[in-house]
Image: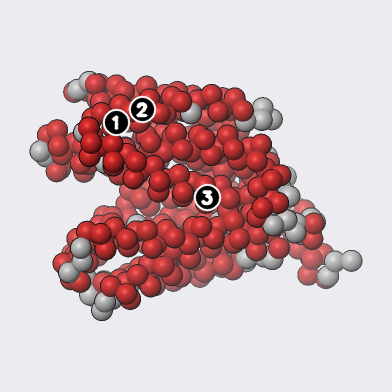
Amino acid sequence: MGSETDIQENKKTDGRSNRFQTGKILALSIGHFIHDVYSSFLSPLLPLLIDKLSLTLTQAGFLSTMMQLPALLNPYIGVMADRISVRYFVILAPAMTAVPMSLIGVAPSYGVLLLLLFITGISVSIFHVPSPVMIAQLSAARKGRGMSFFMTGGELARTIGPLVAVAGVSLLGLEGFYPVMVFGLISSGWLYLKLRDVPVNDVHTKRKRNLTALQTWRKLRYILWPLTAILVFRGFMHASMTAFLPTYINQETGNLWLAGMALTLFEIAGVAGVLTAGSMSDLFGRRKTLLVSLVGAPICLFVFVLTGGWFRIVALLVTGFTLLSTTPVMLALVQEHGRQAPAAANGLFMMISFIARSAVVVVVGFIADRIGLQAAYLISAAMGLIGIPFIFLLPKK
């Protein structure tokens, strides 16, 4: 028999399980935006940290790796989220990320800086593994739309976060930067008011969810294997455009302003794609939406590399729109098929995504060192085309 708390939570959940809860989804999406603004501070502040602590480029590169390292724990965080209600972890995550990221400017040594970024990485995982499960639960039948709202918050943060960091340092200085943490603290308080009655898991079936990460993989390998292949081949295009686009434009034009503008346009188009794709996949199907995106992205990337003028600008925008729009669709797929252990399934997906991104960006950089960035871009577009057949291995329903 369930406890009185479970019965009360059942009643709360039953009354909302069949409708799209816009208010709570928007609250979690805004929380995602605020959280990811803080987690995007490292890149724009890195030159200042290099000067302050006299870091080598190898040490500077390892900072990002240290921040992403806890993503390897995502499946185990997901298993925990399936067994207990971790909504307070989701609520506290903006504050837990804001504090260490606001303190990186006062870090007295490289070791302390690594520790702050590792803590941030743990907080990032704690937020991103269970929160899509909450979104899926609050979205009812329109999971794609819910994931689009949620992922739009993250994409906007990656566009605006660097500007916030630079503005904050310009006003307060690197070592006086720490008061910006207050917005993350306020965000966690606001999320508590909005989400305190939303369970991460469904109390009707949570006692059945005792699957380990390995058992979850075995049950879902029919969908995770094709998604892994798609993530790897898509990763070549993603690495080219997100990691090397400013460098590529700067090499061609010698204009840093144009290089920065190109990345901004790409990210803005990606926000529009993320906001649109999930809802479109609710209407037309996940596979069809992924097919349009993963055919459009490599073709437009070829056009971007081989043309100039307005054709290149249009190709850049369409590449951003199609390439970045795939994530909410894939998240919705994982949640629909991973109902027995939704957080563990999401944790596995996020771990695969992290490994694919981290490995592929090194490969693209290696290719660019050997034969040039333009050739690396063309190879990346070709690799994107190879990922298309794996879409047909995904389940139709």
- Say above or below: 13 vs 251: below
Q: Residues within 10 Å of mark 3 (few under 14, many from 20)?
A: many
Kind of residue at badge 2: Ala
Which mark, by number, is residue 381?
Answer: 2
Q: Name the residue at 27% across, 25% down.
A: 304
* Label 1 to label 2: alpha-carbon separation: 6 Å
Which mark, by number, is residue 65?
Answer: none
Quarter of the rendering occupied by the C terminus: top right
Q: Name the residue at 63% across, 37% down.
A: 223
Instruction: Looking at the picture, tell me which residue is in the foreground, 44 or 141.
Output: 44
Q: Is residue 156 left or right of residue 137?
A: left
Q: Name the residue at 21% across, 66% down.
A: 55
* Label 2 to label 3: alpha-carbon separation: 23 Å
Quarter of the rendering occupied by the N terminus: bottom right
* Label 3 to label 1: alpha-carbon separation: 25 Å
Kind of residue at badge 1: Tyr
Task: Report x, y in % for residue 307.
Answer: 22, 20
- Say above or below: 339 vs 324: below
Q: Is residue 367 left or right of residue 331?
A: left
Q: Residues within 10 Å of mark 2 (few under 14, many from 20)?
A: many
Q: Which residue is mark 1?
A: 377
C-beta proximity under 8 Å, tags 2 and 3: no
Which mark, by number, is residue 350?
Answer: 3
